[in-house]
Amino acid sequence: MNCTINGELIIIGGAEDKSGNREILRKVADMINKEEDTMIVSTLASDLGKEVGYDYKNLFHDLGVKNVEILDISSREECEDKNFLDMVKKASLIFFTGGNQLKITSLIGGTPLYEEMKKLHENGGIFAGTSAGASVMSETMIVRGPDEESPKKHNLSKCPGFGFMQGVMIDQHFAQRGRIGRLLGAIAENPSILGIGIDEDTAIVVNKKEEYFTVIGSGAVYIIDGRNLTYSSLLEQESEVPLSLFNVKMHVLKSGNCFDLNKKQPLEEERIR
């Protein structure tokens, strides 16, 4: 299964630095013309929408972005509001905050607002997301599952994401919450999907043209490739028993490393400036 991308993506593992160097948020801000372009902070995932929205708005103002709008909606009816649709049409970048990823997709999936976001992405618009906002970027997202456990059968809840990055499944807060087991379990269910686990204060910057990404931030990114899986006990055991998975490949990437999404190969050198 190929990984395909249209617009550029910045996918953040959550808990990005907001008070120090702010490397990741600075990278988000630098992706657009700070004087002329409009950035949207979407708080769809959060239960504290306005508060979170203004926090990020102030952060991006501090980083030089002049035009920052907050998209804070709580019903599907609002997704037909002309003001919100026009906001998305004028945007160059949409940043999704953390919270509950299912809240994002269930609120806007299939609505005119979602269609405008798809058009923006297809026309080269930039999308960034942290934590829950990272998970929705892939075509299938993990909604919930146990942390700090061995990979097991059917212990995950998954649903369709936005599909902005196809052929992958993304998990966040990866090392901090011990999520390698649940991502391995997800890949066992469909080894053609590439698993990407992203630590906190860490992000992948995905290039739309060459279909590779570069790692930035203080943590690591973990790539789980199950295409050459030779044996899995998935179909022959109970759900509470750990899975056997043979010949699974894993790469660990730090800041500056790249990954070729077509060849499924890591690269040492930094390629995105």
Image: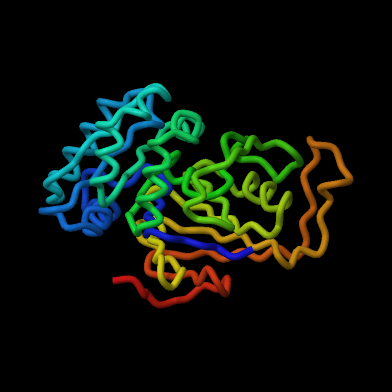
Residue drawn at (46%, 69%), measured in percent from left and top?
Answer: 211
Q: Quadrant of the N terminus?
A: bottom right
The answer to which image quadrant residue 19 occupies is top left
Q: How are the residues colored?
A: rainbow
Q: Quadrant of residue 60?
A: top left
Looking at the rendered image, the quarter that the C terminus falls into is bottom left
Tell me residue 171's x, y (percent). Answer: 53, 47
Q: Position of residue 138 (x, y in %)?
A: 52, 50
Measured along the vertical axis of the image, is residue 146 above or below residue 3?
Answer: above
Vertical order, 141 against 267 (above or below): above
How many marks are shown on the rendered structure?
Answer: 0
Q: Nearer the viewer, residue 55 or 9?
A: 9
Q: Is residue 59 left or right of residue 216?
A: left
Q: Is residue 158 left or right of residue 190?
A: left
User: In this orientation, which residue lies closer to the viewer: 113 or 23?
Assistant: 113
> Which residue lies at the image location 18% right of the left edge and 41% below the top edge?
68
Above or below, comparing residue 82 to residue 4 in the picture:
above
Q: Residue at x 21, y 58 (%)?
A: 30
In the image, farthest residue toward the right: 236
Task: Identify which residue is drawn at 24% across, 38% down.
Answer: 56
Q: Is residue 104 left or right of residue 41?
A: right
The x and y percentages for residue 15 are 36, 42
Figure check: 54 above or below 16: above
Q: Nearer the viewer, residue 189 or 110?
A: 110
